[in-house]
Image (cartoon, coloured by chain):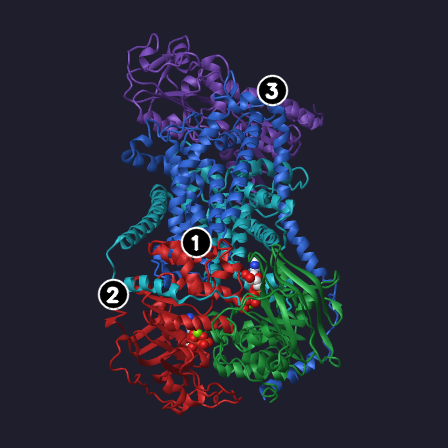
Chain colours: A cyan, B purple, C blue, D green, E red
Amino acid sequence: MTGPPERPSTERTRLATAGARAATAGSLSRQPGGDVVKGNIFFALLLLAIAVVLFGLAAIIVQAAINGAPALSFDLFTNPSSSLPERAGFRTALIGTLYLILGVVLLVVPIGVGAAIYLEEYADRTRWWNRLIELNIQNLAGVPSIIFGILGLAFIVRGPLDLGFIVAAGSLTLALLVLPTVILAAREAIRAVPPSIREGSLALGATQWQTIRRQVLPASIPGIATGVILAVSRAIGETAPLLLVGATTFVTFNPTFLGDDGYSALPVLIFNYATRPQDEFQTLASAGVIVMLVVLLAINAFAVWLRNRYERQW
Amino acid sequence: GSGGGSGGGLSGTIRIDGSSTVAPLSELVAELFQEENPDVKVTVGTSGTGGGFEKFCAGETDISDASRSIEPGEEEACADNGITTSRLTVANDALTVVVNPENPVSCMTVDQLNQVWDPQLKLGSWSEIKGLEPSFDAELTLFGPGTDSGTFDYFTGAVNGEEGAQRSDYNNVGEDDNQTVTGVQGADGGMGYFGFSYFEENEGKVKALEIDGGEGCVAPSAETVRDGSYVPLRRGLFIYPSAEALRRPEVQEFLQFYLYRVNDVAAQAGFIALTGKQLREAQSELKTLLGSGGEGTAG
Amino acid sequence: MQARDAIGASGAIGTSPPRSLEAPSRRYGEKAIQGLLALCAIVSVATTTAIVVSLLIPTLSFFSEVPVGDFLFGTDWAPTFAPASFGVLPVVVGTLSTTLWGMLVAVPVGLLSAIYLSEYARPGVRRVVKPVIEVLAGIPTVAIGIFALIALSPAIGKVLPFMVKVPPFSAGVAGIAIGLMIVPIIASISDDAMRAVPGGLREAAYALGATRMKVATRVVFPAAISGVVASVVLATSRAIGETMVVLLAAGASPNLSLDPGSSVQTMTAFIGTTATGDIATGTITYDTIFAVGTLLFAMTLVMNVVAIRLVRRYREVYE
Amino acid sequence: MARHENRPETAREAAAGRASIAVRPEFRQGANAGAKEKMFEIENVTVSYDGQPAVKDISLDIFKNEVTALIGPSGCGKSTLIRCLNRMNDLILGAEVSGRLLYHGQDLYGPKVDPVQVRKMIGMVFQKPNPFPKSIFDNAAFGPRVLRMKDIEERVEKALRCAVLWDEVKDRLDQNAYEMSGGQQQRLCIARALAVDPDVILMDEPCSALDPIATGKIEDLMVTLKEEFSIVIVTHNMQQAARVSDRTAFLMVELDATERSRWGRLVEYDETEKIFTNPADSRTEDYVSGKVG
Amino acid sequence: MARHENRPETAREAAAGRASIAVRPEFRQGANAGAKEKMFEIENVTVSYDGQPAVKDISLDIFKNEVTALIGPSGCGKSTLIRCLNRMNDLILGAEVSGRLLYHGQDLYGPKVDPVQVRKMIGMVFQKPNPFPKSIFDNAAFGPRVLRMKDIEERVEKALRCAVLWDEVKDRLDQNAYEMSGGQQQRLCIARALAVDPDVILMDEPCSALDPIATGKIEDLMVTLKEEFSIVIVTHNMQQAARVSDRTAFLMVELDATERSRWGRLVEYDETEKIFTNPADSRTEDYVSGKVG
Ligand SMILES: Nc1ncnc2c1ncn2[C@@H]1O[C@H](COP(=O)(O)OP(=O)(O)OP(=O)(O)O)[C@@H](O)[C@H]1O
Ligand SMILES: Nc1ncnc2c1ncn2[C@@H]1O[C@H](COP(=O)(O)OP(=O)(O)OP(=O)(O)O)[C@@H](O)[C@H]1O
Ligand SMILES: [Mg+2]
Ligand SMILES: [Mg+2]
């Protein structure tokens, strides 16, 4: 039969060695030795890494808070922007940013997840065009944001799409910019769903889309949420491409998503203020950073909640 | 301003874009204008003089802020799109050369500045500058704005005789002139230059050099700029309205308002106000433009 | 009996099971969805095409005036000076330098953080720490740049004097700031990838007497390598593409040097400032933006081809 | 109960020692099957992974309203073969099926055939339990929901009852399926397959993690179900094959001359009673009586 | 070979129908064990998941150089109990062990005990095969490498031979373990555990996916191994328990009065021969003879 000719002698030799070792093993308590030391060093390194990150973050926030302290007040959220620092607020820029991000999320989630699903679940990896798409997405992630600005100006604001200098055009530009982040994160999440789950679903007569929709996607929500969090975080802080596609620094009225009256965005304003000569504006810029973090946290809170809710372990 | 202001029910949107140097002035004027005309929306962008003209010549903005004059190529592009424009000077600036407060030198000639910034000489120390009084020995640490800026072009043109003809081995601070302050403050032999407003805000941290443009040492100030004695580093800042847009009443009103109020607010925004002569010139330019816009003839 | 009941129910519905193996409907819905999904993937291709198109024409016009060789191998970068010089190597090296320093910070810190989050942290801790780390990704780059310049630079200058020379600009400090900024990309995506490794694999390793460190490094990490590499590639791309931080903290002086203490100009910083500066469009200087952009595009392309190869090679498939 | 019938004397003792297998490329169709309706006709089917054949040249007919068992040593290709029957192998990259496979006379691998439709009719329980990371209820309800069936709750309850799981889980239907014991997970997977009322049910070692009681109940279930459906079961448990199946196929591993390649081959296929009491092939006899190994 | 001895008549038929189990909180120590060295002493151990007890109040002693079998219906807590013995339950969030668990007289859950050290000595094979997504060789070599053993190749080969897998895989040691059949995967997991020469081996249904031949060989292996090591095995296969084990513990599910909560309880623990031929408890008798269910 398929089994090997069992030679008891083989086993005996083996057991002899085993016995020798087993006799010495006795204590259950921690053996002082290389492994323990290594493990401790490793753990210390892990904590150090986390500490570095948290400390860095804290330092940035504290620095912004201290610098911005004189200007910090709730009025920052309600006052429109002004060229007079004492009455300047971020309301109009804030609304512009909220619209921008809303547009980014609405665009990037379906497109990003859709592309990820296509690549992981439908695309035949051996086909050159699918490999090309894969390469192309990774490559897009490395294109500097200003190039997206140039692209947005040429193809979205003008050119084929001809949207004009409206918030939606800015959203679309930013969405293209952060699309690779969402696609890559979503792909990894989808890839991590064990094949046996797909088999189980397909074997019940579910179509491929039903399998994706009801098994794969729910299981990959945490990873997708991470991608969206990172994407939104990046989109919210981008300045350069927005300048090109029409975000202005000075808007005293509340912008609308499709209106072409002009709009502003927080980072554009912050950048502009930060490079002005007057100290008051630099203070305002720091305060703006705090405003932006508050907004960012509020926006991400939902994604974080979603991610925690769907977290699971196979 | 409350509703039903004195503007007589003007409404519409006025788009301004261009140099980030000029933007604070346009913003301030725009803010005041909107107080009187609450239904007019004015936006000010900062995509740079070049970027501003590009949009302007594509007919996408009404007014372009500029820290330099429009170039022939840009003018052509405007003409291709049927856009006529004319330069209105709205404020003055004094490019200010700053050094460390500890530096004993207080005045330099244009030639000495040229030595410092000359692309060939590449001086390494203050002591190598010919004819400098009092003598000073420290390593030259140079700071300058981004080479894409109008400030760079103007300074190099005035000091080195040709735009861009400057040594490149200096600390380029890019977009944020505040860094020149930090840098010069930190280096004994530091030297840098930027717009007057940066100096005004940082007096004490850095020292402004007097410039000898041939007729003795002159310190940069509002007065020396206005009386024309601060040469050659005084420059004008401009706006370029489009004749096309000037057919719209709100734009006409805005530009007239601009020139009417600009001298009151220039100092507040960190600029040096126009002289009476400059202002009159600007006003007559605007009239010409209004005329051509009204006739609807272009190019 | 229970079994009988089941059959009763099934009988009602399944009396005449469809015997045809062909699809009862043409499943247009499925096909439409697949088409839509493919379309989503095409969006990225369209984007790239548009980028290539918008880069290509000015790039060609640039190279009609500047020889390719002078551009690629020249060591003097002064496109906005007179006389102009277009040797791109200093900005390429500047990009490599800041990216290198950034990755030196971000990769170890990010990966160790990910391991901590996924393998060591209790769920409560993780649920708090992970979003907090992600906040870093959302701090406006201007703020990080200014922070690097006025807080990080002096601090590092005290500890590692060679990193910061007289002017406050240094490639090393800018790199570290970028590193901090992209840590969340690595930490967060790698953490997700490691969390997705089936628990059975951990159990198996623990049962063999592996310590937590070995389980993390020898089982979980390799099993998640695909996600880990993806996160590093994404982070590297981000580091290469970052503009504002380098502009503020690394200065804007092109220097052909990998010295962390020297001020450098990166490709992106050049593109970023020039595109929003006062240079007139349509000039050769302005076209330089596109030539640099094209080169950057080509460089990231090479990096990604290599990365994709690597992932293929080392990916571990479970189940 | 019908399951105590054709139970032969089985699996007495497995003697140690190894009999080498002669390469004998023969196969057999089940006998005495004239009157029965054919469900699957498998003709010269070979399945390869990455070009390496895993089973070679299998031909057998599987009949309606019967339980057909596949037995054979580990690695002989039982799972590979059973997965062909509802085109699960489509999902494995590099897996390739050649030969002809008819289901009710229609070519299962025909160009117009829709694998989804195939799997709707031919359900499957896998060797490794693979519950979905959802609640117990959602696991069982998944199939009915996907197929837009009515009375989901009722169906779920019945399916869980059939799989002898209801009593254990009725109070915690919303608990995650991964928090169940191994045997509970396996029964849940069985319930999940039953809930959609397939035409044929393929079971790859459905009772491997079950205790005798649960096994007995599942076996009862199979016997009951076969009145309406057909069942193909892979099992390594001779007694189980003997107890529940009407027909048994015995596969074995064959080596090529160099002993480098190995693949599964059908040795004998016949009525279960015959296989266990009077097999035609001596290798079958050795295997079912436990003499090989 | 020693495995054909004390095999009683077992598991004849499982009749359908459900007998309710009376709550009888008694437990027993194994008898006739005076001379043997105790390996594990389990005293009043209760394991709960999220506060819900899964097994309650288990007390039994496990002896050195013996094979101890845990049997009982699915969900009665066999896996839960066996996982306590090498502290695998530490890894499950919400799992809580109370009571006393001694290993060679040392408290397994004592404050100074290092779970890693515990698991080095007490190996485990899991119910669901869980190979690493690495090559076959790397799977078997994982333990020895982690423990910095020498002669890795030799060890791997021996372990694979012991687990009756060598001949099937010797030519493709660098293939991914997930490309093996279910039974091969399980044997690989057994080999992996053997490769580190643990002191005790815990096996949670190690043969559930194996054919009789491979099962027989693994059983042979257990009998040989127990001369040096001790083995605890969970099995739902009565014959297997009867064939290989020296001592058998029978667990059963108990319901509380409201029928809402259920947990496992030790019904009887004794020498295997006694459990299978003359059990003290009628429920044991019913179970091993297949009368319950
Ligand atoms: N991680 C968990 N969380 C919550 N409950 C659990 C978990 N694991 C097991 N249980 C429950 O504990 C009880 C005992 O489970 P256990 O896995 O020990 O059973 P078992 O005797 O091994 O059964 P089987 O023979 O089916 O493997 C079951 O009711 C099960 O649902
Ligand atoms: N995905 C795969 N890629 C490559 N080879 C595979 C794959 N799956 C199975 N094989 C090989 O094909 C052969 C048959 O495997 P199969 O799973 O059909 O065996 P089996 O009869 O079900 O065995 P068991 O009883 O152990 O489950 C084995 O040698 C196995 O190693
Ligand atoms: Mg199998
Ligand atoms: Mg179990």
Q: Are marks 3 and 1 in contact (CB under 8 Å)?
A: no
Q: Disc 3 marks which amino acid?
A: Glu
Which of E114 and A148 lies nearest the eye of the viewer?
E114
The numbered dot on residue A26 is 2
Up/down of D94 relative to B246, above or below: below
Q: Quadrant of residue D93?
A: bottom right
Q: Dot 3 falls on which chain?
A: C
Residue under the point 66% across and 53% down: C36
Q: Position of residue D248 (x, y in %)?
A: 62, 76
Q: Disc 1 marks which amino acid?
A: Asp
Q: Secondary structure at mark 1?
A: helix
Up/down of A162 relative to E217, above or below: above
Q: Nearer the viewer, mark 3 or mark 2?
A: 2
The numbered dot on residue C202 is none
Residue under the point 29% across and 54% down: A35
Count neighbours of disc 2 (C-alpha within 10 A) and say few if under 14, some if 14 to 19, many if 20 or more.
Answer: some
Up/down of C5 relative to E38, above or below: below
Q: Dot 2 falls on which chain?
A: A
In space, the residues marked 3 and 1 are separated at their CA atoms by: 49 Å
Tell whether circle 3 marks a residue whose Cβ is less than 8 angstroms from ligand 2. Answer: no
Count neighbours of disc 1 (C-alpha within 10 A) and say few if under 14, some if 14 to 19, many if 20 or more.
Answer: many
Q: Nearer the viewer, mark 3 or mark 1?
A: 1
Q: Disc 2 marks which amino acid?
A: Gly
Q: Is residue B123 visible?
A: yes
Residue hosting label 1: C191
Q: Position of residue E236 (x, y in %)?
A: 45, 78
Q: Quadrant of residue A87?
A: top left
Tell me which label, 3 or 1, sits earlier in the chain.
3
Residue hosting label 3: C65
Q: Position of residue A170 (x, y in %)?
A: 57, 43
